[in-house]
Amino acid sequence: MALKSTIYKAELSIADMDRNYYNTHQLTLARHPSETDERLMIRVLAFAIHADEALVNAKGLSDTEEPDLWQKDLTGAIQLWIEIGQPDDKRLLKAAGRSEQVMVYSYAATSHVWWKQLANKIDRAKNVSVINIPAEASAALEKMAQRSMQLQCTIQDSQIWLTDGTETVLVERETLKA
């Protein structure tokens, strides 16, 4: 018998002063059995950074043809494809061909080793950006994971503060490929 996903609910209030985006989103997150709380929270962070009414959770780990998050236009064309973790070059090149923009959010302590092996393989994909979330920040985000969450995210001058009312985490992204 296959294990089922665990459902997490999050009320995410976003104040993105860099994009002038202010909204509250009710997120239902299906955590795949192989997904960690850390990865789940990086997915929430990526949603907050790119928040839009058209941005939705995709099948990600459950389906190799879909990213973790994506945004489509009204015709069904993929505008934004978001991967979490350390995808391989074939997956990223395929995504680059299918969407206008591809964003990768890596977060593990081994991200720099992964990136060193991958960088020259995806260099020709101009629509792929890679952002690394420092290990300390992703570990702090992991501690916020609860089955029911109320989160506030403030983005200003490329700095991100995520709080659950008790703890606040400052996330300073490291751009590996713009």
Image (spheres, helix red, strand yellow):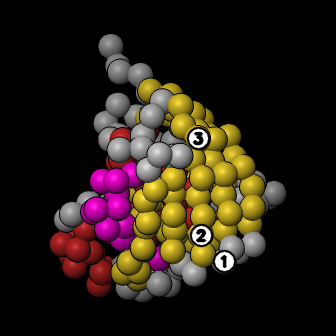
Assign a secondary structure to mark 1: loop
What is the CA distance from the residue labelled 1 to the residue labelled 2? 7 Å
Specify whether residue 98 is painted magenta: no
Q: Bounds of the magenta span?
A: 129-141
Residue 76 showing in the rendered view: no
Mark 2 is surrounded, within 10 Å at the Cα level, by few (under 14), some (14 to 19) or many (20 or more) other residues, namely many
N-term mark: 1 or 2: 1
N-term mark: 3 or 1: 1
Query: Disc 3 vs disc 1: Cβ atoms closer than 8 Å?
Result: no
Numbered circle sitting on residue 18? 1
What is the CA distance from the residue labelled 3 to the residue labelled 1? 22 Å
* Coordinates of residue 107 in the picture (x, y in percent): 32, 62
Numbered circle sitting on residue 33? none
| Amino acid type, callout 1 | Asp
Q: Is residue 160 above or below residue 54?
A: below
What is the CA distance from the residue labelled 3 to the residue labelled 2? 17 Å
